[in-house]
Amino acid sequence: METGSITTPFGRRSMTLGMLASQVMAGEIKPDQSVDKWKLFRALCEAKPLLGISDRALSVLNALLSFYPKNELAQENGLIVFPSNIQLSLRTHGMAEQTVRRHLAALVEAGLLLRKDSPNGKRYVRRDRAGEVNEAFGFSLAPLLARAEEIERLAAEVMAERLHVQRLRERITLCRRDIAKLIEAAVEEDVQGDWQRLYLEFRDLVEGLPRSPTTAQLELLLDELTALRAEILKQLEIRMKSAKQRGNAGYIERHIQNSNTESTSELEPSFETKQGATPEQDNGRGVVTLEEGRGEIAHPSRQEVRQGRRPGARDDAGGLKSFPLGLVLQACPEILAYGANGEIRSWRDLMAAAVTVRSMLGVSPSAYEEAANAMGPENAATVMACILERGGHINSAGGYLRDLTRRSEKGEFAIGPMLMALLRANAPAGRKAG
């Protein structure tokens, strides 16, 4: 049994006010107070972040609890355990004795254990003639019993915080899905709007989240995504009301038609390009800028992803869609090095660079000619730029191009997903450079 007196540590270990407070608290345990030691230990494991203890320290505490003979921690059963460091090392699966001593000190510092040292610092027990424990020296588990309610409350707080974070993540996932699908719906229904800016802003928010975010960072992200979703919904509602007032079932944005069937360079919408590419800005030649042709966007719809279409794309040879030149250069910046003076200003420049790349990659003239006939010359040049961009992942450029040509003739190939993947890979670097 315990004497209830204040004890100081043996040897060089100093006494602290924290130890004194723990001993005073242990002396205030009610006579009938008890708690299941393993239930309390599980609560300790939950409350570990708030108590400032490590998992290794909990392993040592688990070993100490295993030396307590009863399942219920109670004053009447005695609260002192006195295993040697060797026995503790064995029950902590071979933990070094020095490590055991360090974690024992951490448990005492955290106020979860009390040292009741003998005059010579050894741990032992004195028993009476009946075999009952008369006096024991070792570690007292009294602080655990005294702080049982506090530990359970801290464990409940940690579990509530975990549930809160889980719900935050669920709401963020739903919000991300809503934003992506609303933008896709807007594109699919040909709704005017700066969807490219909204999509890039959406990606910036998502990619800016750390790998292990705090609760505050998750809450901030949810607020920003909610605001972005509200902005998208507001724009869609405005367009819906406008379309309803005009009596149109679906809003058809302004269409830009190219009368020159041999080249589309003069009416290609201007997108921001990466380093080395020069945006077309001469409106005297019929070039449409992003502000003038606000219907041009960068985020694809579900249907466009399935069919390989891109916002602002036009029907060309082979049933495929051609894409804005600036967008192709953003997705495939390596093709710029093969243009005249390191620049590509028109589709003619891109097609000339594609011929150079074809020769460099060992693609036969017949394979490229078949691709141009099946896809159209501009799309064939776009595919060659994509193959160059992914050159490190393609063993045979010629065989790959012939396979894409066969799939294009069957209607099974779409350029859109290929460009989207490359655009996502190069967009962050492009935004930092810009």
Image: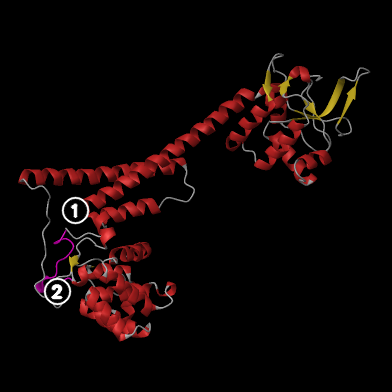
Residue indicated by mark 2: 266
Residue identified by numbered label 1: 193
Q: Disc 2 residue type?
A: Glu
Q: Residues within 10 Å of mark 1 (few under 14, many from 20)?
A: many
Question: Where does residue 117 sit, x and y in percent of width and height?
Answer: 83, 30
Q: Which structural element holds mark 2?
A: loop
Q: Is residue 337 left or right of residue 326?
A: right
Q: Residue 379: which disc?
A: none
Q: Quadrant of the N terminus?
A: top right
Does the rendering let one see residue 339? no
Write down the region rendered in magenta.
281-294
Residue shown at 27%/63% (left/top)? 308
Q: Badge 2: few (under 14), some or many (20 or more) residues near its Cα, within 10 Å?
A: some
Amino acid at dot 1: Gly
Describe residue 83's horizontal placement relative to residue 348 as left or right.
Answer: right
**In 3D space, how far apart are the residues under numbered discs 2 and 1 (Cα atoms)?**
23 Å
Quarter of the image holding residue 140?
top right
